């Protein structure tokens, strides 16, 4: 009998037939859009002078090309490039302002991650919502804040978005730009953004809500709760897992066992996608597809963007624990240099003169904004007491629930919870 089966299988094989899938064997797909899959790992070494990390693997691979976008036009690519340049130059200016003693508190950088911030936020529509983290200053620029706003915020100026009450990029705008302020407690933005999507759903709309979490922050319980809730409710959450290989001084290899963080999507029952976080086109395309899915009411998407945090955690951290060859490897994959090369040399969508003019224009805007921010006043001591509680006439407080419903024809009021609430 067994022999007959074997012969049948051999005949099928010869005819090119494959055996039916094993029903007990489940297979899942994670779309991986990268054109390069870096092959190296970090090893912790304990020496006399403490712990250090060594990188093992091939760091000599050539820089991959940029993947052509399925959706972006020439003009849109140039616009994203411009945002990335502004993001980088603004952070360089902030570093200098910090060194001049003009910044209150620290400065957080998204160096090397500008493509991820700018190209992702670029996929949002006006009615969508954004919940940036502290490194996503590029997302804030794309969403309509100026470099002036961000620099004034870091210098705690009276005219800054929080009027000098908070430093760094902890601010949002829930009135016009649909931006929820970053929340320091890692992961907490995820259920908040899921809630925003739920709110829109209750108003009869499906929108995209985009937020970010790091390779470290994704381990928190609230990340699981937030994504799971969004998945179960089919809410339009677009979650970028920014895998920049470090969470403070802990390398990604010591934070999780899965090969790719996009695999987490399998357990949530949602699509998972991997992109090269230094390729603006890949980021935009994945973000666009996830946003479209969100707007169709089909639920969340988890996008893992792989890249490298090119500075320490914040300005106080020199990142001495990062092996130098790792920086060298990723410096060759700088997202702005690669996109510039793509636009100027590969696509020839920008001439050298056009590129120089664009860079000069970004510098001009930035210089003006920096001058304005530096010369603007600090808040007055009395203003500290303002804007904490609502003042008379500050804004209209609308009823929390709708007015009691009147049953048609009967003229009788329905006793609702809302009515009780009003008493
Ligand atoms: C729940 C919680 N735990 C710890 C911290 C302290 N903390 C702030 S940033 C950070 C590292 C985050 O690393 P990662 O998520 O990889 O983001 P990255 O800084 O690399 O962008 C930690 C541990 C926090 N803010 N919230
Ligand atoms: Mg990280």
Image: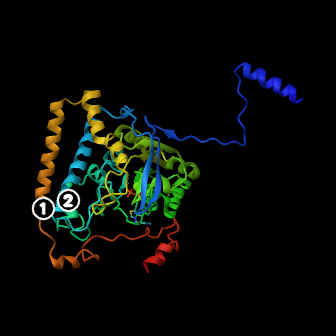
Quarter of the rendered structure image containing ligand 2: bottom left
User: Horizontal placement of 178 versus 215: left or right?
Assistant: left
Quarter of the image for the N terminus: give it.
Answer: top right
- Asked which colour scheme the image uses, the reply is rainbow
Quadrant of the snapshot with the C terminus? bottom left
Is residue 396 among what the camera can see? yes
Asked if disc 1 and disc 2 are in contact, CB closer than 8 Å, the reply is yes
Distance between mark 1 and mark 2 Cα atoms:
8 Å
What's the residue at 72%, 43% (across, down)?
Answer: 24
Q: Whole-percent x and y of residue 89?
A: 21, 49
Per the image, label 2 sits on a secondary structure element best described as: helix
Q: How many marks can you see?
A: 2
Write down the residue under mark 2: 151
Q: Which residue is mark 1?
A: 374
Outermost residue toward the front in this view: 48
Disc 1 residue: CB within 8 Å of ligand 1: no
Sequence order check: which comes first, mark 1 or mark 2?
2
Q: Residues within 10 Å of mark 2 (few under 14, many from 20)?
A: many
* Residue depicted at x 69% and y 42%: 25
Q: Along the line of sight, which residue is nearer the eye, 332 or 46?
A: 46
Q: Residue at x 60, y 42 (%)?
A: 28
- Residue 122 vs residue 84, the one in the foreground: 84
Q: Residue furthest top?
A: 15
Location of residue 336 in the rendering, given as x and y in whole percent from the top left corner:
28, 41
Q: Which mark is residue 25?
A: none
Is disc 2's CB within 8 Å of ligand 1?
A: no
Callout 1: SS = helix
């Amino acid at each position: 009998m067994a022999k007959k089966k074997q012969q049948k299988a051999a005949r099928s094989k010869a005819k090119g037939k494959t055996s039916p899938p094993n029903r007990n064997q489940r297979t899942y797909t994670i779309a991986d859009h990268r054109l390069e899959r870096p092959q190296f790992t970090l090893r912790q070494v304990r020496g006399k002078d403490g712990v250090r990390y060594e990188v093992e693997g091939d760091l000599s691979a050539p820089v991959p090309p940029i993947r052509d976008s399925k959706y972006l036009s020439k003009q849109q690519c140039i616009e994203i490039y411009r945002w990335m340049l502004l993001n980088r130059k603004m952070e360089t200016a902030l570093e200098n302002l910090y060194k001049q003693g003009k910044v209150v508190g620290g400065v957080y950088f998204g160096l090397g991650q500008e493509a991820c911030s700018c190209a992702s936020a670029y996929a949002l529509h006006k009615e969508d919502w954004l919940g940036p983290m502290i490194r996503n200053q590029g997302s804030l620029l794309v969403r309509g804040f100026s470099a002036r706003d961000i620099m004034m915020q870091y210098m705690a100026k009276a005219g800054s978005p929080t009027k000098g009450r908070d430093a760094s990029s902890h601010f949002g705008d829930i009135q016009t730009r649909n931006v929820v302020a970053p929340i320091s407690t890692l992961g907490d933005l995820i259920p908040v953004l899921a809630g925003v999507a739920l709110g829109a759903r209750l108003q009869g709309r499906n929108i995209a809500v985009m937020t970010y979490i790091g390779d470290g922050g994704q381990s928190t319980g609230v990340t699981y709760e937030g994504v799971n809730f969004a998945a179960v409710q089919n809410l339009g959450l677009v979650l970028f897992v920014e895998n920049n290989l470090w969470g403070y001084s802990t390398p990604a290899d010591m934070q999780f066992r899965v090969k790719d963080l996009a695999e987490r999507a399998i357990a949530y029952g949602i699509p998972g996608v991997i992109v090269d976080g230094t390729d603006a086109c890949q980021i935009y395309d994945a973000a666009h597809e996830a946003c479209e899915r969100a707007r169709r009411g089909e639920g969340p998407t988890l996008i893992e963007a792989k890249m490298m945090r090119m500075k320490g955690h914040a300005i106080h951290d020199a990142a001495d624990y990062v092996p130098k060859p790792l920086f060298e490897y990723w410096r060759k994959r700088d997202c702005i240099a690669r996109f510039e090369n793509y636009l100027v040399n590969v696509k020839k969508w920008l001439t050298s003169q056009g590129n120089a003019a664009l860079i000069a224009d970004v510098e001009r805007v930035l210089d003006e904004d920096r001058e304005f921010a530096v010369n603007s006043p600090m808040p007055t001591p009395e203003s500290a007491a303002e804007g904490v509680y609502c003042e008379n006439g500050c804004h209209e407080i609308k009823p929390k629930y709708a007015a009691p419903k009147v049953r048609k024809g009967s003229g009788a009021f329905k006793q609702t919870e809302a009515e009780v609430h009003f008493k």
